[in-house]
Every structure is written in structure tokens, then in C-alpha cells.
Amino acid sequence: MRKESSTNFENQQTLTDFCNASKTLLLISGRWKLSLLFCLLEHDSRTFSDFKQLLPSISDRMLALHLKQLTNDFLIIKEKKHESVCYSLTKKGRSLEDILSGLAQWQIN
């Protein structure tokens, strides 16, 4: 998190206000966010332990942080199902499918 009074924060705000692509990249940037989104694209609903099994290198703290950020950005939803907490994509999150697929297919030669 950057201080709201910093020049970097002001520049980031200017870019995201000016360019929707910058805003989108900001929402999905983070070491694990793309992997979490891909996990949810492959399967409609995942639990915290599902993510830990699929991404064993992620710490509990980092997983919880990224899930919270994605929830706060309305890309995923947290729901209680059958005595467990599950995460799934929202309509907004699902709308990223073509973009994420394009990113996955693109390669630097």
C-alpha cells in the first residue's frame, strides 16, 4: 500500500482515471492473483484449502490477503456452503475470462 500523499500514488490515480487498461491491470496485479483467478475459471468454486493444495508455495497470510483484495474489488465472492467457506467468480470476475485466456496464450519470442 502506498501513502495517499505520495507522488507514486497520485501518478497511479492519474493513470487509472485516464486508462481503463491500467485500472484492470492494477486489479489483477499481484504475485498470486492471476493464479487464483485461473483456479476459479477452471472450477466454479474453491475453498481456502483447495487453493493451498493447488498453490502450495503461497503462504496462508498472502492467500488470505489476495482473496480479500479480490473480494473487495468485486472479482470474487465469498460464500458459506455446507459448513465451509467457498470462493467463486462474480459476473465481473468471469468477464475477465477472455482477457486472462489471451494473457495465457501470449508469449514473448
Image (cartoon, rainbow, N blue to C red):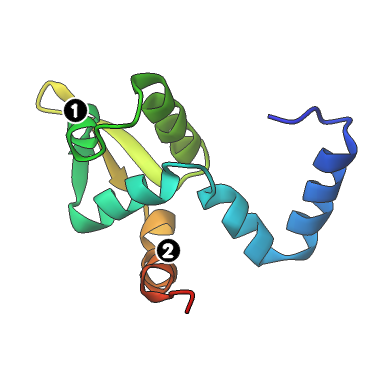
Q: Which residue lies furthest to the left in this view?
A: 82
The residue located at (20%, 40%) in the rendering is 54
Callout 2 touching callout 1 (CB < 8 Å): no
Coordinates of residue 24 in the picture (x, y in percent): 58, 58
Tell me the quadrant of the picture where the N terminus can be found. Answer: top right
Frontmost residue, 109 versus 77: 109
Q: Distance between the residues labelled 2 and 1?
A: 24 Å
Residue ID for mark 2: 96
**Above or below — where is 40 with respect to 105?**
above
Secondary structure, mark 1, is: helix
Q: In which quarter of the image is residue 19?
A: bottom right
Q: Residue 16 carries which label?
A: none
**Above or below — where is 61 with respect to 20?**
above
Question: Which residue type carries mark 1?
Answer: Ser
Tally of numbered tags: 2
Residue ID for mark 1: 49
Sooner in the amino-acid sequence: mark 2 or mark 1? 1
The residue located at (17%, 52%) in the rendering is 43
Frontmost residue, 30 versus 45: 30
Secondary structure, mark 2, is: loop
Q: Quadrant of residue 61?
A: top left
The residue located at (44%, 37%) in the rendering is 71
Q: Is residue 73 left or right of residue 100?
A: right
Q: In which quarter of the image is residue 41?
A: bottom left
Q: Residues within 10 Å of mark 2 (few under 14, many from 20)?
A: some
Coordinates of residue 21 in the picture (x, y in percent): 64, 65
Coordinates of residue 82 in the picture (x, y in percent): 9, 27
Q: Is residue 42 left or right of residue 34?
A: left
Q: Residue furthest front?
A: 109
Question: Which residue type carries mark 2?
Answer: Leu
